[in-house]
Image (cartoon, rainbow, N blue to C red):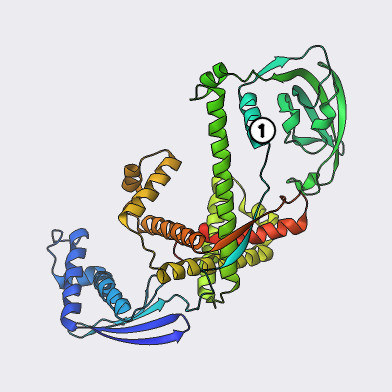
Amino acid sequence: MQTTLTKENENVVILNMTIPANEADSAYNLAANRISQYVNINGFRKGKAPKSVVERHVGVDRIQQEALDMILPKYISQAISENKLDTVTQPALTAYNYEPGQDLRVTVQVETRPEFTIGAYKGLELKAEVAPEDKGALDNAINNFLTQNSSLELVLDRPSNDTDIVVFDFDGTCDGEKIQGGSAKGYALDLANSNFIPGFAEQLVGHNMKEEFTIDVRFPDEYHDKKLQGKDAKFDIKLNEIKQRVLPELNDELVKKATRFSTVDELKTDIQSFIDTQRENAKKISAENAVFKSIVDSTSINIPQSMIDREVRAIANDYQQRIANQGGNWAQFIESQGGETKFAQTLSEDAKIRIKNSLIVDKISKEENLTVNQEDLTGRLTQLSMAYGTTPEQLVKQFGQNPAFVNSLSQQVISDKVRNFLIDNNKFEYVEVEPAKEGDKEAKAKKKSSKKADKAEEKTEEV
């Protein structure tokens, strides 16, 4: 085979290949024979029709396509290997000249990974932000444990308070009209953990069982139902029951009954170990964010528009799939994101970040010779099987023949290895920073930016 290589632009290469006539003719004849095995041709049993008859029946073009599908993968792979092309997409056949008894000439377009010089990624001294240690975490966890094992008792001798669970009927109106979905009977609401609109649960406090009353509320300006955004509304309430939560005594007997432990001390030790592990994981994630942000900021990559467009389609398809799975409406989702133009800009920005992060991960893995072996894949399969409540063998049986699944698995392993490498080869000073307060726009924007810079660990598929 003869191959000439032409660089069309920065990351698109054209391969012009010439395949010897004898191999091209052999592939054509084999393709014609294969097609005759599964098409019905009058007067012939399957697989017995002569080539000329098959050509008249299905057309030469179809046979050529079958032959090309058979012969090209090997030669394209050979050309890519010989020319050391780092491809990011499947090669595309753009032209061919397939004549009997003549050399087969094909033109293939290949998109390659952008070339760039990565910024410093080893020996850095960085600051990583972490939340202050929660001194009350153990007590809160124990309280949650007691709450999970609590009982509810009916209250008969006092009005409701803000820690009660109330059972009530309600009927809402807005501008004199009933609110769609704004009424129910026998609804149970935990007043301490209400998911109703602001001001609703608070007005159920201080009332007695069987009492009927009306409350006034205002729907948030960003309420999901546009017809109710910022509107005043009234709800007629009938308070049927008041219940209070009674916590059990924390003792060894309760622990034995509700957990796999035998004593309170064993339970507390396990909870504290979990809290410590969570804090260490949070520190690691913060360190990963810090080092990766440093690398991203110091690395310039000219990302081709074709890669951005392809990634945008992938992200959009993912959004659409999730919206469909949740029973949502795509048009409403687009509107909630600020309209098509703004959403498209968001997708483009996210696509650039994902591509850049993925390219950096790939670059570091090659620079440091971080590879994937069978033990790595087996370990990752075990983790996935535990998460999905199945076995590694069942996952292999279901997805093992899917190249995309295997590739995704490999990318996850490589991503993990790169992150661990960056943690091990840089120094971090952990700085305690109070969590952003609700409504702090500047902090939210910073958090959003940080999340985008950390997309590398979420990116598990080849760009």
Task: Look at the image and tell me in which quarter the N terminus lies.
Answer: bottom left
Query: At which x and y percent is residue 212?
Result: 85, 20
Q: Residues within 10 Å of mark 1 (few under 14, many from 20)?
A: few
State left or right for residue 376 relative to residue 184: left
Asked whether 159 or 401 is in front, the reply is 159
Q: How many marks?
A: 1
Residue found farthest to the top: 157
Q: Which residue is identified by label 1?
A: 140
Q: Is residue 64 visible?
A: no
Asked whether 292 or 316 is in front, the reply is 292
Q: Of helix, strand and loop, which one carries label 1?
A: helix
**With respect to residue 419, does 281 lie above or below?**
above
State left or right for residue 24 relative to residue 313: left
**For residue 110, what is the image quadrant?**
bottom left
Identify which amino acid the numbered label 1 is placed on: Asn
Query: At which x and y percent is residue 184?
Result: 73, 27
Query: At which x and y percent is residue 162?
Result: 79, 27
**For residue 42, what is the image quadrant?**
bottom left
Asked whether 445 or 254 is in front, the reply is 254
Residue drawn 39% across and 79% down?
109
State left or right for residue 106 relative to residue 386: left
Query: At which x and y percent is residue 97?
Result: 29, 83
Asked whether 334 or 395 is in front, the reply is 395
Residue drawn 51% across and 19% down?
256
Residue drawn 42% across and 60% down?
414
Q: Is residue 80 visible?
A: yes
Residue drawn 64% across and 29% down?
144
